[in-house]
Amino acid sequence: MKKNEEYDIEIVDNGVNFEGIAKKEGIIIFVDEAIIGEECKIQILKVNSSHAYGKIKQILADSNYRQEPVCEVFKRCGGCSCQHINYNFILNLKTKIVENSLRKQGVVYDKLSSCIGMGLPYYYRNKVQYPVRMDSNNNTKLGFYAKRSHEVIENVCCYIQDRIIDMVAKDIFSRIIALGFNGYDEISFSGDIRHIMIRRGYHTSEIMVVLVVNNKSLLNDNRFISLTNDLVKKNEKVKSVVLNLNENNTNEILGEKQKIIYGENYITDYIGDYKYYISSKSFFQVNTSQAEVLYNVLKEGLELNKKEILFDLYSGVGSIGIFLSDSVKEVYGIEIEEEAVKMANMNIKLNNVENAEYITGSVEDRLEEFKNRKIKPDVIVVDPPRKGLDDKSIEYIIEFKPRKIGYVSCNPATLARDLKSLSKMYDIKEIIPVDMFPQTSHCEVVCILELKEKLKNEFV
């Protein structure tokens, strides 16, 4: 098998990124945008010793699950990956990805539910981070990166963003161009504006605008005052405008230094009955309506009671712990980001929650502190980053021996790895995938673990 050769192949499966999988001459071939069951003529793009990559030249027999993407730049833009697949089948694929991850680790569980989807799987993201870049013709462009590239693809309408956010972002873009600002050049590290970031409250409609600039002198540029005044006059829901300075040659979007041009460095929104402050740097679920589904699934699965102490680990702005606070005696949250902990403690006061405490630090260090304070959890909830739990955190969780664990994961592979470790002491009762990111291959998973029956008598 060589590069540029063409083959007729059958797609026998879909991978973790929804790429089609075929086999030819003992080699696995990954084919973007192909769907299981299809017959395709493909061209080989790259060959390794055990696998190859190909692209579709012609679909000879298409899948019943194939549909026409709603977005005109879907094939070029990297913002989403599966608009060409029927949504119900996408949910099946996501359930299968979780199932396969568990099987690879040999995880034994009682029940795996089907992935819970959205009624309308579009226009859901409450946060956008648009790169603003110079192209090869020295024009400033706004859009999303092309697949496996930093070429910016412009679009008329982004179908996974909150529609108001998308329109506000493009309005701001036209204004910064009119004011003489240009985009960032990733080769020379020059230019004015690197990103336009916007957050919008799903329930409150409050809007935060963050303009990421490339030079500290821009923090005092009066043109931003003019832009802000126009924005606020046009849309009364704009509650915060912030300049963020990022002069580093990095893929990180936000820098450390910020200047508030208008309002405060936060907006508010609700999950269920609870209201939350959300800052420019805070982690907050990007799909609010599905976050409510996820949190309720977690709450029901844990079967909490008012005598219990709950640890909320990797707690962000405290959204999970506060959501569960009315069902337990006490909540203790740990989060490494200082700004998020500040927001969490503001959120406690905002909701008159008197039984919660949030502290800054790494989970492994702070768990040692709780151990020394003789504070023992009955229930632990974890919502770690994609890399999952580290060995030390798992060691401490097992040492605390809570009655139940609620694991919220954004990565089925690391979830399965961690469940394998935790299953030495815990039965895995229920696994519930929730589609937090429609039109992409990502999904969130709620897992309920219960202390093994033979260990419950030792539990104090």
Image (spheres, helix red, strand yellow):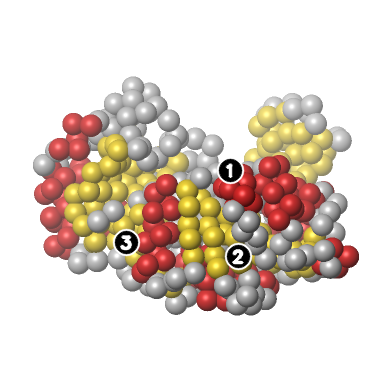
Point out the tag, 3 or 1, that comes first from the N-terminus: 3
Q: As shown in the figure, which amino acid type bears the numbered disc 1?
A: Asp
Q: Which residue is mark 1?
A: 365
The numbered mark, 1 or 2, whose residue comes first in the sequence reads 2
Residue at the extreme right: 454
Q: Which amino acid is tagged 3?
A: Ile
Query: Which residue is drawn at the image coordinates 73% and 47% (left, top)?
Result: 395
* Quadrant assignment, res 439: bottom right
Mark 2 residue element = strand
Q: Distance between the Cα atoms at labels 1 and 2?
A: 18 Å
- Quarter placement of the C terminus: bottom right
Between 103 and 63, the one nearer to me in the picture: 103
Residue 178's label in the rendered image is none
Q: Residues within 10 Å of mark 1 (few under 14, many from 20)?
A: few
| Residue 119 against residue 18 in the figure, above or below | below
Query: The residue under label 2 is which amino acid type?
Result: Leu
Q: Say which label, 3 or 2, has the lower sequence index.
A: 3
